[in-house]
Image (cartoon, helix red, strand yellow):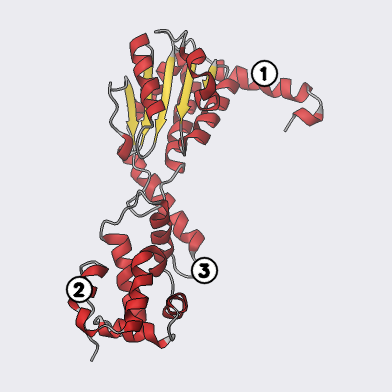
Amino acid sequence: MSKPVPSSGFLSDLITRNASRLTGSDTRLLDVLVKDPIRAAIENGKEVSLRAGVHPAAAVRLAKRLGFEGYPEFRAYLQANLVEEGNDFENPAARMAARLVRAEEGQVLSSVLDSEIAALEALRTAVPDSDIRAFSEALRDARKIFIFGRGHAASLSSLIALRLQRSGYDAADLGDRTHHFAEMLNRLSPDDVVWLLAFRRPSQQISDANGIASMRGATRLALTDLLAARFDPAPDHQICASRGEAGESQSLVVPMTIANAVILDLAGIDGGRSIRSLEEFKAFRQSLPPRWRR
């Protein structure tokens, strides 16, 4: 009959409850596991034993002493703790390890696709069309548009600025010009729009840009995930959407999809400005020497 597998509690709890039964080899193994629980949740018993400098069978004996049928069951416990017990998913290593735990061997792509699709399906009902329209109307009426994202949002900021420029709008990526931050925002006016992108938590620079834009009377748009939802002062318009469940890698597909929807909606309400500009841009690029057409 199989021994019951402990269903809750951290690794330290298991050690405390079984301390009197542990051997020297057990202690060396546990030292390795405790120091790097993320790696421990992925490796098999032989790999852990090798790092601890003990016989490969020692990992199996440790698992049994802790109340598990064998090392695979012990590792499953470590994996469940990693995914479900509220570990620090601010840690990117923890998030990646949790993803590897969930993905079956040879099914990594399928696992990533499932995660992205789930996040996008949740987006379908989380963001109303009226929020998209509020963004696109603000952009349509702007004299100048500043887009600003840091960290993971920086690449998205750059792409949004590029697409708006091609659509005929005076748009600038502040993330690409932080060394000219003062010069870029010095002439900010109530006719301008500042589009802020913030994931996990707004950086101090994002908060500074929000404060300056508020003082200058510019319209402020914020595209955030749930963890970065709070701004002070609050933006004029904000779209807040989950980028994935805890323990999942946080998707950039979700905010990119929202940005795509805003830019598409903008093209539908700007009296043909976007379409004409894209046609003019295509013609201009074709007139350039081949080396400049990429």
Secondary structure, mark 3, is loop
- For the residues carrying marks 2 and 1, which lies nearer the camera in this image? 2
Residue 285 at x, y percent in the picture: 73, 24
Q: How many marks?
A: 3
Viewer-side label of 3, 2:
2
Left or right side of 92 for 283: right
**Residue holding disc 2:** 16
Which residue is pictured at 38% across the width and 53% down the height? 248
Q: Amino acid at mark 1?
A: Glu
Identify residue for label 1.
280
For the point 38% across and 12% down, which residue is it? Answer: 218
Residue at figure coordinates x 67%, y 21% from the top left? 281
- Picture quarter with the C terminus: top right
Which amino acid type is shown beneath numbered disc 2? Thr
How many neighbours does mark 1 have within 10 angstroms: few (below 14), some (14-19), or many (20 or more)? Answer: some
The vertical placement of 80 against 96, above or below, is below
> Please, what secondary structure does the residue beneath circle 2 have?
helix
**Quadrant position of residue 42:** bottom left
> Residue 117: where, in percent of width, then height?
42, 50
Q: Earlier in the sequence, mark 2 or mark 1?
A: 2
Residue carrying label 3: 106
Give the quarter of the image for residue 71.
Answer: bottom left
Regarding mark 1 in the picture, which secondary structure is present there? helix
Q: Earlier in the sequence, mark 3 or mark 2?
A: 2
